[in-house]
Amino acid sequence: MNLENIKDVAQKILYEIRERKVDKRATVLALEGDLGAGKTHLTKEIGNILGVEEEINSPTFVVMKMYETKDKDFLHLVHIDAYRLEEKDKDNLKLEEIFSRENTLVVVEWPEIIKNVLPENRIKVSIQHLEEEERLVNID
């Protein structure tokens, strides 16, 4: 992945997500990768494809942001950045409620921090640095 083909990567991920969707509950996309790997950039492109009109920024300090979409399958996009999340904050966010919302795509950056509350049927996407502008993206 690079800036030139990030839209193609985002479309491929959304295709995979739609193919795997089995019910109306939220689909959870766990984005793994080092700092600066492109997790937020990929989330922005996914939001663009889904028709989010607001600017999508990293929710590092607010932890979670919700967006309305124009997509027929995913009416809401929830973007969670768990990087600074502490154990005591997990209950306040009502994550289990978020994960059970209908017609919602939840994108989680730093999912390893909240792995004990993530649904088992999450879709894992890992992003690895190859070169300055090149990334390797794997979907599990």
Image (spheres, helix red, strand yellow):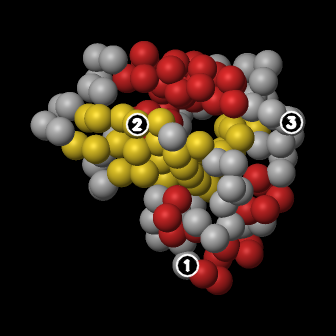
Which residue is at 42% across, 16% downward? 8
Mark 3 residue type: Lys
Mark 2, residue position = 138
Q: Amino acid at mark 1?
A: Glu
Confirm whether residue 108 shows in the render. Answer: yes
The CA span between labels 3 and 2 is 25 Å
SS class of the residue under badge 1?
loop
Nearer to the camera, 61 or 72: 72
Which three-letter amino acid code belongs to the residue tagged 2? Asn
Task: Name the residue rendered at 64%, 83% in the picture.
Answer: 88
Mark 2 lies on a secondary structure that is strand
- In the shown orientation, is residue 44 left or right of residue 90? left
Which residue is the site of mark 3?
24
Closer to us: 45 or 59: 45
Q: Which residue is mark 1?
A: 86
Residue at 77% across, 43% down: 26
Find residue 70 and report its horizontal and vertical position in percent: 73, 20
